[in-house]
């Protein structure tokens, strides 16, 4: 039986990543066919869509970059944490080695996480910005740091007009990132929904909401600053001008990410983000 083809992507800027991959190369070669080993920032090699697994060495940001790069291939992602938090990249090297046989055999299945496609329809007639989204789309006011005004619709239905420092559209995966820090709700990873969370809104009546994504969400830039930007997953950005429309819709294919079989979602929230923990005690909920 032919061995399964595996693509290895890595953030070689993190200390120890290159050395760790070098030490594991022989171990991998005994079990799989390595399609390529390369930086997560480089263009994907030919034949990537034929890979049956992508092992990502880095942190959560590296895994998000890989999810965008592989957005249309359906290749599942296994994140090996070489960073700090490891909320999405849940495996350490030891656990990756322990569970890889079950992953290759199909005994452990990836979780499908909804992604978005976002584009900017430019009022100035310039080429539109386009990107897949794994985590979130943030609109940041930027210099000279005046309040900006945005109108949000789902399809043709008006949701609200926002005045403040910006807005976050987050997938369930991204709900535990910038969205959560800005006071938005946490969503279970498998939901088909997005959160709309204002950043420092000018009025107390504008609160974060969660909506279905059966229709495109359109954000019109009514009045923005010279430095206002659209930021995807905290990694890709584009300028925004008055009259531009940001359109976010559910991507055709989800990201497929392997969760650690011994760490249910709420347990990960508790252990990684201290969710549900009392500020007066050191104990964790059971």
Image (spheres, rainbow, N blue to C red):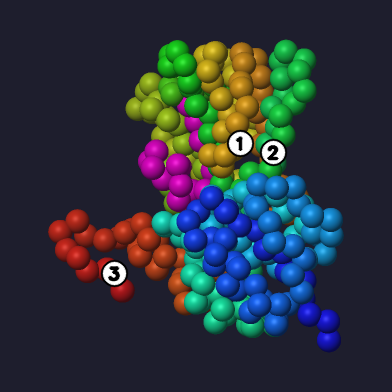
The reply to whether residue 5 is visible in this rendering is: yes
**Given contact means CB atoms under 8 Å apart, are the residues at marks 2 and 3 in contact?**
no
In the rendered image, the residue lying farthest to the bottom is 1
Q: Which residue is mark 2?
A: 131
- Range of magenta residues: 166-183
Q: Is residue 176 magenta?
A: yes
Q: Is residue 252 magenta?
A: no
Numbered mark located on residue 140 in the image: none
Q: Secondary structure at mark 3?
A: loop
Q: Residue at x 53, y 34 (%)?
A: 138
> Of circles 3 and 1, which is in front?
1
Sort mark 3 into few (<14), some (14-19) or many (20+) by Cα contacts within 10 Å.
few
Q: Which residue is mark 3?
A: 285
> Marks 3 and 1, how far apart in space?
37 Å
> Marks 2 and 1, how far apart in space?
8 Å
Q: Residue at x 38, y 21 (%)?
A: 202
Residue 154, above or below 88:
above
Residue 246: name its quadrant: top right
Which comes before the other along the chain, label 2 or label 1? 2
Position of residue 153 in the picture relative to residue 263 (left or right): right
Which comes before the other along the chain, label 2 or label 3? 2
Position of residue 83 in the picture relative to residue 213 (left or right): left
Q: Which residue is mark 1?
A: 236
> Of circles 2 and 1, which is in front?
1
In the rendered image, the residue lying farthest to the left is 280
Q: Secondary structure at mark 2?
A: strand
Name the spot of residue 194 as percent of width and height, x first: 56, 45
């Amino acid at each position: 039986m032919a061995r399964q083809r595996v693509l290895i992507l890595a953030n070689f800027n993190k200390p120890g990543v290159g050395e760790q991959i070098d030490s594991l190369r022989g171990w991998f070669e005994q079990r799989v066919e390595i399609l390529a080993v390369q930086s997560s920032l480089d263009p994907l090699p030919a034949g990537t869509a034929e890979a049956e697994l992508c092992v990502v060495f880095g942190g959560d940001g590296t895994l998000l970059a890989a999810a965008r790069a592989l957005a249309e291939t359906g290749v599942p992602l296994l994140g090996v944490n070489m960073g700090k938090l490891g909320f999405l990249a849940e495996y350490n090297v030891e656990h990756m080695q322990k569970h890889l046989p079950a992953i290759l055999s199909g005994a452990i299945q990836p979780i499908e996480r909804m992604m978005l496609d976002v584009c900017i329809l430019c009022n100035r007639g310039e080429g539109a910005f386009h990107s897949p989204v794994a985590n979130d789309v943030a609109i940041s006011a930027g210099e000279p740091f005046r309040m900006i005004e945005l109108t949000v619709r789902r399809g043709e239905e008006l949701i609200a007009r926002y005045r403040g420092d910006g807005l976050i559209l987050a997938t369930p995966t991204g709900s535990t990132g910038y969205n959560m820090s800005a006071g938005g709700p946490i969503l279970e990873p498998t939901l088909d929904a997005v959160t709309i969370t204002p950043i420092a809104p000018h009025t107390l009546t504008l609160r974060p909401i969660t909506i279905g994504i059966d229709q495109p969400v359109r954000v019109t830039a009514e009045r923005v600053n010279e430095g206002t930007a659209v930021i995807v997953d905290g990694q890709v950005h584009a300028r925004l001008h008055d009259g531009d429309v940001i359109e976010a819709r559910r991507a055709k294919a989800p990201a497929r990410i392997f969760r650690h079989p011994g760490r249910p979602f709420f347990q990960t929230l508790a252990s990684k983000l201290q969710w549900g923990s009392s500020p007066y005690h050191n104990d964790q909920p059971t």
